[in-house]
Image (spheres, helix red, strand yellow):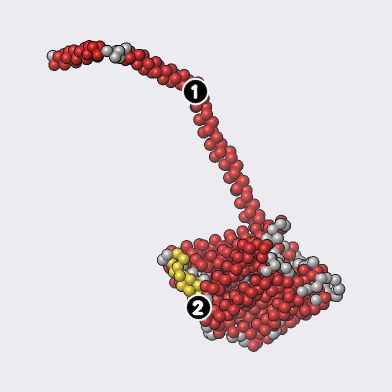
Amino acid sequence: MIVALAVTPPAAGALLLLAGRRADRAAPALGVLVAAAVLALAVAAAVTRPAARFALLPGWPGGLAVDGLSGVLVVTVASVLLLILVFAAADGYGARFFGLMLLFAGAMLVTVTASDLVLLLMGWEVMGAMSYALIGYEWREAEPVRSADVAFLTTRAADLGLYAAAGFAVAGTHSLALSSLAGAAEPWRGLAAAGAVLAALGKSAQLPFSFWLSRAMAGPSPVSALLHSATMVAAGAYLLLRLDPLLAATGWAGTFVAWAGAVTALVLGAVALAQRDLKQLLAASTCAQIGFMVLGAGAGSVSGGTAQLVAHAAVKSLLFLCAGAWLTALGTRRLDKLHGAARRYWLVGAAFGAGALALAGLPPFALWVTKDEVLTAAGARSPALLAVGLAASVLSAAYAAKALFAVWRGTRTDGARVPLLARLPLVVLAGAACSLGVLGLRGVADALGIPGETRVNGLELAVSGVLAAVTIVAVRFARAVPAPAWAADWLFLERAARAGIVRPAFAVARALAAFDDRYVDGAVRAVARSGQRAAGLAGRGAEPRLDGLVAGVGRGARRLAALARRPQTGLVHTYYAQAAVLLAVLVAVAVLAGW
């Protein structure tokens, strides 16, 4: 079962890619059918929790396994995949799109079910490669390709940490099993934790890697919905939740991860509030909401972080699909151009409203309880962490309210029709956004089998709900103020990366190229020129003498041959005479030698 779960999506995706344009008409139906089959397999696997043990490398056992955490994740990934592919089927995407999406989702399923670092790295890498292909899906346009380059190179740089972690795991435990990392000897345990944290923060677009997620908005809206909800960006948070024993064992890693998540949630919340593009606002809010999951992982709240991940997957996929529907119908994603969009398309507007209120943390929507469970664990770890988390929570309500009021303000009558097939997933996801908050109470904790974790109390829930409601009202009546440039431009992170890494790297490359051209290549050319000059000197000076010597030897050989031919007369008596003379010479030599 678990092998079928891991193999079915990538196998179907590869077949669609190989079929190419010939399968364009059948691809939407096939993609949806495969996604439905994957969801059925995921639910069955979550219930039965199968495992497949094997060793890809001789002597290094590993395999695939579904436990409480991966069981929740596979169902989440499969559910979101099915709904997004149904939405994409209404937009007329072809075989290449559905093939890449299935490969992408299959890589995520391998990532969350892998029990060793070899399979984890395989899923991790394929997911990164497919994200590059999907962000740059419109490859004939320059901007999506440049954005795909930025996203791919940024995440690949951070991914090196996971390779380093695998190397340190081998040194410290002589094993690649994820469960063995916490038992590694120092300093290998700390080094493995550092590598895993680096890879996770890069994949989940946490500071200072957040800017790549802004670039990922160049991809189609269904890609953004899948990438930002249950896959890719969530993979880093999942890894940190999976490695909770390792973070706790090091002593420092849990605290570092908790603060990284809290600071990202706060700072990227400010970035989201400053955006004027709906997809950019949702992208920055993804970084911020993933920050709460990372905070939960660092604070030791595995159930809280997981519940936040599941609820956020439903909410964020819903919001991105609504944005995609409006982009297709109205041709814009700018907030000031979307006024009245919710009234014009009331079902899409109602679904977006449910998602925005959930994102704001308003009771009783999905993220209200899950986020508070994370904050409760943060408060148990440090009051300062709780303060930063609460501030980030207020910003969540602010940027969600900004988007909500922008699309509901005013009226309009223009725009194309949103297909019925595209509206069906919105209804399902809106229902999930309204109801998944219960996961933060008991559902995920029971599924994970960790009933002893800290639970949020009623007073905390009430305070959080009041803060969200007050913030929404304040945004409604607040005057618009110009956004600071640092927030609108994503903290200038990409500029800093270009100035501090890209430009110096290119400068070093140019210097090395110049050194190669001038000195290394110059030395090679000098050696070649020296050889040519030596050959020329040899040709002018030594060659005539050598030719003369060879010619002299030839002439001597010819003369000796002429002398040797003279006795060869063919007469027998002549041969006898020659033999007699030779005998006499030999006798004389013998006598003289004896004397």
Q: Amino acid at mark 2?
A: Pro
At 68% from the left and 57% from the top, the residue drawn is: 146
Q: Name the N-terminal-most of marks 2 and 1.
A: 2
Percent position of residue 239, x then y: 55, 71
Q: Quadrant of residue 88?
A: bottom right
Q: Does 538 sit above or below residue 127?
A: above
Along the horizontal axis of the image, is 400 left or right of 581?
A: right
Q: Is residue 387 visible?
A: no
In the foreground, 326 or 178? 326
At 71% from the left and 63% from the top, the residue drawn is: 218
Q: Secondary structure at mark 2?
A: loop
Q: Which residue is mark 1?
A: 539
C-alpha span from label 2 to label 1: 81 Å
Percent position of residue 394, x then y: 70, 77
The local crowd at label 2, few if under 14, some if 14 to 19, many if 20 or more residues have their Cα within 10 Å, is some
In the foreground, 344 or 389? 344
Along the horizontal axis of the image, is 86 left or right of 112?
A: right
Q: Secondary structure at mark 1?
A: helix
The outermost residue toward the left is 595
Q: Amino acid at mark 1?
A: Gly
Q: Which residue is mark 2?
A: 50
Q: Does 288 sit above or below residue 428?
A: above
At 53% from the left and 70% from the top, the residue drawn is: 253
Q: Is residue 442 visible?
A: yes
